[in-house]
Amino acid sequence: MKQTADVVIVGGGCMGASVAHYLAARDVTDVILIEREPQLGTQSTGRNAGGFRHQFSDPANIALSKESIAVFADFEPAVGQAIDFWPDGYLFLLSSEASVHAFQRNVALQREHGVAVDWLSPADAAALCSGLDTTGVLGATYCGDDGITDPNGVTQGFARAAQALGVEIRRGEEVIGMTVTAGRVSAVQTSQGSIATYNVINAAGPWAREVGRMAGIEVPVVPERRHIFIAQPPGGGSWDDAPHRARMPESRLMVIDFESTFYFHREGGGLLFGMADPDEEAGFDTTVRWDFLPKVIDVAIKRLPALADAAVSHAWAGLYEMTPDHNPIIGAAPGVDGFYTIAGFSGHGFQHSPAAGRILADLVTGRDPGLDISSFAHDRFKAAATDGEHNIV
Ligand SMILES: Cc1cc2nc3c(=O)[nH]c(=O)nc-3n(C[C@H](O)[C@H](O)[C@H](O)COP(=O)(O)OP(=O)(O)OC[C@H]3O[C@@H](n4cnc5c(N)ncnc54)[C@H](O)[C@@H]3O)c2cc1C
């Protein structure tokens, strides 16, 4: 087993796999990626809704989206892995004057950045989505270039492409400590031994704070449980079957009721839906709280009445990785040379993994990332409050 590496990546979710891929593409192949679970991508990455969108409020996130969605669109020919890419659109429903004003500003900003986003009346929104009840909706935004794709395919595709170029991927091994010598990372301790290295990438998702502390770095990332539920039509079958067809969207359009955070999209013959729980406290517990389901259904049936008699066939919970301003941390940590973070995407990270991984690979190899990434700087929290990203659910 190798005991030295130019770079050690901690974490094999979409972020770790993406950085590994882009480092290898820059001829940095003396890299070891370490994932403590038996498989890659089983934590936040394997539990997310697969959504991607251009509709953000921070221009830096719009830039990440444009680059990443272009990578998704070309993923199979470029990276060699099918990713079930469905650009069927994202529809945000707005029911308060404050949201309407904020989204009017967002739409102007997104258009400035070349995103084709439309402002819709409630009737236009209803026409896009069979079964949608728009009572109380004041306006909506729609981008037909947004959509959903497969997080597992993206992670496996990046990982296999990196491995093919020489990156070593170790599963079932945990990083348990680090050595910092004269202000620079010098070694990583794992459950299997020690690896001498001068560069460590913290891609530990919701555990980024714990991994940062191993090097004496404070990474302000807090885990927060989020649920996803899958609903089947009453009596089984598919929502495409004749009795239900008019009560559900036909396409894989993602619909987000911004005020309540209830969201849904078609998932095969079923429907995937979720909502944030305002009473959820920070923590690593991912047990499904079935007592939360009735609260979601109460909200959900006001927008999608067909859910009133649906059968919820299964559910899971995963962790959002929240930062104080809901933007990620991408880059070098001040104070310890050779320690980099790519974490804290606050619930919208999967879709930004291609651009984020590319940017970090550029920073590690001393290249200009070509984007203003000050919104993602490690040390921004010490300064005055940052504006951050407002468009999260
Ligand atoms: C319910 C839900 C819905 C979501 N929906 C969307 C969506 O629609 N679109 C979107 O873009 N994003 C979405 N997200 C967010 C997205 O899933 C995350 O932003 C993204 O997956 C983060 O990827 P990651 O690689 O940083 O983290 P992870 O996938 O969690 O990977 C981190 C890895 O590090 C490993 N690790 C941690 N500590 C150690 C250690 N000490 N040693 C070794 N390995 C370690 C973990 O085992 C884990 O596999 C959603 C998240 C949830 C929970």
Image (cartoon, rainbow, N blue to C red):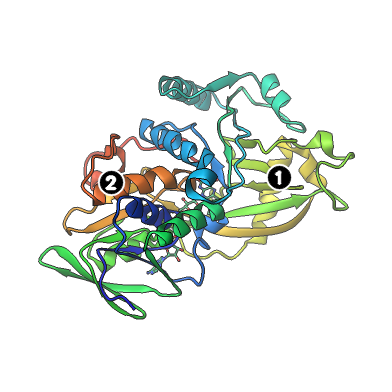
* Residue 326 visible within the image: no
> Could you say which disc has been placed on residue 311 in the image?
none
In depth, the one of 247 and 258 nearer the eye is 247
Q: Residue at x 22, y 65 (%)?
A: 216
The location of residue 337, given as percent across then percent down, is 17, 58
Q: Position of residue 307 (x, y in %)?
A: 77, 44
Dot 2 beta carbon under 8 Å from ligand 1: no
- The N terminus, quarter of image: bottom left
Label 1: which secondary element:
helix
Horizontal and vertical percent position of residue 365: 24, 50
Q: Please name the amino acid that badge 2 sits on.
A: Asp
Q: Few, some or many C-alpha atoms within 10 Å of disc 2 (few <14, some 14-19, many ≥20)? A: some
| Type of the residue with mark 1 | Asp
Residue 148 x/y as whole percent = 59, 42
Q: Which residue is mark 1?
A: 298
Identity of the residue furthest to the bottom in this view: 192
Reading the image, the residue beneath label 2 is 362
Q: Is residue 115 left or right of residue 366?
A: right
